[in-house]
Structures are given as C-alpha cells and as structure tokens.
Image (tube, grey):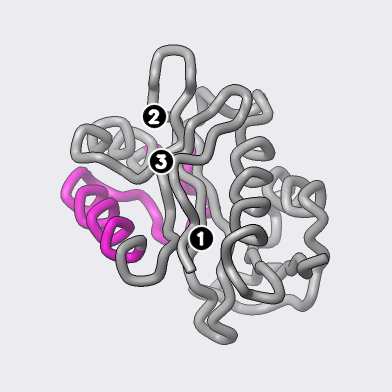
Amino acid sequence: MTIPLPIETERLVIRPFAPGDVDAMARIYGDPQVMEHVCLGVLDRAETTALLEQYGRDQAERGFSTWAVVEKPGGAVVGDVGFGVYPETGEPELGYTLAASAWGRGYGLEAASACVAAAFAHLTHRRLVAKVELGNERSLRLAERLGMRPVETIDFAGHPHVLLALERD
C-alpha cells in the first residue's frame, strides 16, 4: 500500500523532497540545536543530499517515507515528517525534524497528526511506533498528544530511548 501525497493540513503541505529542497534541509540538518536528539547527528550538505535521495528510494520501494514539511504561505521548507521502518518489528516508525525557527508553532503536531491519519487510512499495519530519546521532553509530549503510549525503554545508538506505540482503532 502507498500513502498518497501530498498531504495537506490547514497550514502545511507534506510532499516528497525535491532537488531544490537540499539547501533548506542542509541548514536544518546542519543545526546542532535541531539535531541534538536526532540519531543521525549533524549532517553536511553532501550527507543531506544523500539522505533526501534515500527518502525518494524508500517512497518508491515501500509506499511511505520521510517527506518535506512546507509552509503553505510562501512555500518555505521547514523540516521533515514521515515514517521509517522500525527494524525490530517492521512497523512504520514516525519521526520528524523541524527548523528551530518553526518550533513552538504547533507544526510538529499538525504534520505528525496528518501523517498518522494517512498511515492508518492507507497502510495495513496494526500499529505505528516512535522512539524518543530520554530527555527530549518536547517530542515525548508530542507523541503522547498523538495518543502514543510508552511500551518500553530501549537503547538506540548508545542512548536510552522510550519506544511508544499507537494502535489502530
């Protein structure tokens, strides 16, 4: 199954990455404050380019991926949202990264909520998961506002994370 794109919310468009998005995402992925709790760490422009290309391949291969988050007024790319695959179970794993300038505006919840709704509407998985590094209170609160509940504490990339899950209704 495939999640159809774009996904639109009141203020955002969620769409596949385009080559013209590299500069905006390189600024976001290159910001140590933004990437503090992201397991990839700070990325340079070449690493950003490779990652965005991988997201395109993931979309083609499995029907979902990580996508660009674009503000409707002005069309600025302000981050990413979407799904990887949690390797232990094969379930879609929700994730997002937003530019520091987009923090505190409700974009994370708006984008993640739209992606969760699209996943349950178009994929057959019984549940979605997310892993949040301990200490990342902002992301933990967002996951809980989505209805996700803690399952267990896991080690990922040498750091403790909370694994959360949201069951299909």
Q: Position of residue 71 (x, y in %)?
A: 48, 23
List the residue tagged with mark 3: 15
Element carrying mark 2: strand
Query: Magenta segment, which residues?
Result: 31-58
**Residue 5, numbered label:** none
Question: Which one is closest to the eye, mark 3 or mark 2?
Answer: 3
Q: CA distance from mark 3 to mark 2?
A: 10 Å
| Quadrant holding the C terminus | bottom right
Compared across the picture, whether 38 is left or right of 25 comes to right
Marks 3/2 in contact by CB < 8 Å: the verdict is: no
Cα distance between the residues tagged 1 and 2: 18 Å
- Looking at the image, residue 150 sits to the left or right of residue 49; the answer is right
The residue shown at (63%, 24%) is 10
Q: Residue at x 42, y 59 (%)?
A: 65
Amino acid type, callout 2: Val
Pointer 3 or 2: first along the chain: 3
Disc 3 on helix, strand or loop?
strand
Q: Nearer the viewer, residue 155 or 11?
A: 11
Magenta span has 45?
yes
Whether residue 138 is situated above or below residue 118 in the rendered picture? above
Q: Residue at x 48, y 20 (%)?
A: 72
Q: Secondary structure at mark 1?
A: strand
* Relative horizontal placement of residue 160, taking residue 84 as reference (left or right): right
Name the disc covering residue 77, or none. 2
Q: Residue at x 60, y 52 (%)?
A: 118
Q: Is residue 38 magenta?
A: yes
Badge 3: how crowded within 10 Å, few (<14), some, or many (20+)?
Answer: some
Q: Which SS does the magenta portion mostly show?
A: helix
